[in-house]
């Protein structure tokens, strides 16, 4: 494990060289990377792994226990999520008429998953950090419920109590901003899939709608897996 972490840390400089152009111009970055690099999928997977590592490091201050003990389950969970969402995304494009090489499709998916993982982690740290700073008692209750696998029942039963807390209200603002940024970035980057599949905007829109529909059962399944991993 130590050697693996050292290797991933050594890849961080190259990671940031790719991160900025990927954030600011995802379609251009993907087109350039797919056309000029035969090992695009391998580099995309490494990018995703480094994103996960950085996210794990950022969450250490908010960790409930030993971060090293959480590294393995977190890594497995992220990999499962990425592959499940990648599967339904590929299916959506196939149904819409896209016929592409799976390696190139996965290269886009891994790069995009790495960016979204980083943005999601930033949103999580901002949200939970706000609650911890403003309302430490509520923060403890939420974490106890999350690590006990009871976060959904807790949130549903404590909705009135949560809305009274200023920490929770402010955290909702951080949550909306974070997910708003992610949605805008996804909208901008969606064109990379359309360019790869060479489909019209209408079929691209159809693929997007199909993907949204397919996301519901995947999200439910990931919630079940998440609860199982923390118990």
Image (cartoon, helix red, strand yellow):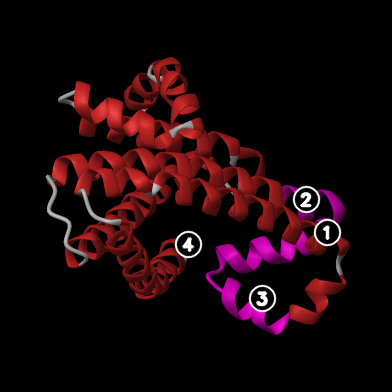
Q: Secondary structure at mark 2?
A: helix
Indicate whether 32 appears above or below 203: above
Q: Nearer the viewer, residue 162 or 33?
A: 33
Q: Residues within 10 Å of mark 2 (few under 14, many from 20)?
A: many
The tag earlier along the polypeptide, 3 or 2, is 2
Tag 4's secondary structure? helix
Few, some or many residues within 10 Å of mark 4 (<14, 14–19, 20+): some
In space, the residues marked 4 and 1 are separated at their CA atoms by 25 Å
Residue at 29% from the left image edge and 48% from the top image edge: 193
| Between 163 and 27, the one nearer to me in the picture | 27
Mark 1 touches mark 2? (CB < 8 Å): yes
> Nearer the observer, disc 4 or disc 2?
2
Q: Residue at x 22, y 44 (%)?
A: 196
Whole-angstrom CA distance, mark 3 to mark 4, is 17 Å
Residue 89 percent coordinates (x, y): 28, 59
From the image, state whether disc 3 or disc 4 is nearer to you: 3
Out of 56 and 211, give the one closest to the viewer: 211
183 left or right of 213? Answer: right
Q: Say which residue label 3 marks.
A: 155
SS category of the residue bearing label 1? helix
Labelled pair 1, 3 in contact (Cβ < 8 Å): no
Classify residue 138 as left or right of residue 115.
right
Q: Which residue is mark 4?
A: 230
Toward the bottom, the furthest residue is 157
The CA distance from mark 3 to mark 2 is: 17 Å
Q: CA distance from mark 1 to mark 2?
A: 6 Å
The residue labelled by disc 1 is: 167
Estimate how packed mark 1 is, as few (under 14), some (14 to 19) or many (20 or more) residues with alpha carbons within 10 Å: many
Residue range in magenta is 129-158
């Amino acid at each position: 494990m130590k050697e693996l972490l050292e290797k991933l840390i050594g890849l961080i400089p190259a990671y940031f060289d790719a991160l900025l152009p990927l954030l600011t111009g995802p379609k251009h970055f993907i087109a350039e990377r797919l056309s000029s690099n035969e090992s695009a999928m391998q580099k995309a997977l490494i990018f995703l792994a480094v994103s996960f590592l950085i996210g794990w490091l950022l969450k250490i201050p908010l960790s409930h226990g030993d971060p090293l003990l959480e590294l393995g389950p977190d890594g497995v969970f992220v990999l499962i999520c990425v592959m499940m969402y990648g599967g339904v995304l590929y299916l959506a494009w196939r149904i819409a008429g896209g016929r592409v090489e799976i390696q190139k499709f996965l290269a886009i998916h891994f790069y995009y998953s790495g960016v979204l993982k980083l943005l999601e982690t930033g949103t999580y740290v901002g949200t939970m950090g706000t609650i911890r700073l403003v309302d430490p008692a509520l923060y403890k209750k939420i974490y106890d419920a999350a690590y006990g696998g009871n976060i959904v029942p807790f949130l549903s039963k404590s909705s009135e109590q949560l809305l009274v807390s200023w920490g929770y209200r402010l955290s909702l603002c951080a949550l909306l901003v974070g997910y708003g940024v992610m949605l805008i970035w996804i909208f901008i980057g969606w064109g990379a899939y359309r360019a790869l599949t060479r489909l019209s905007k209408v079929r691209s829109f159809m693929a997007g709608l199909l993907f949204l529909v397919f996301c519901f059962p995947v999200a439910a399944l990931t919630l079940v897996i998440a609860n199982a991993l923390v118990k």
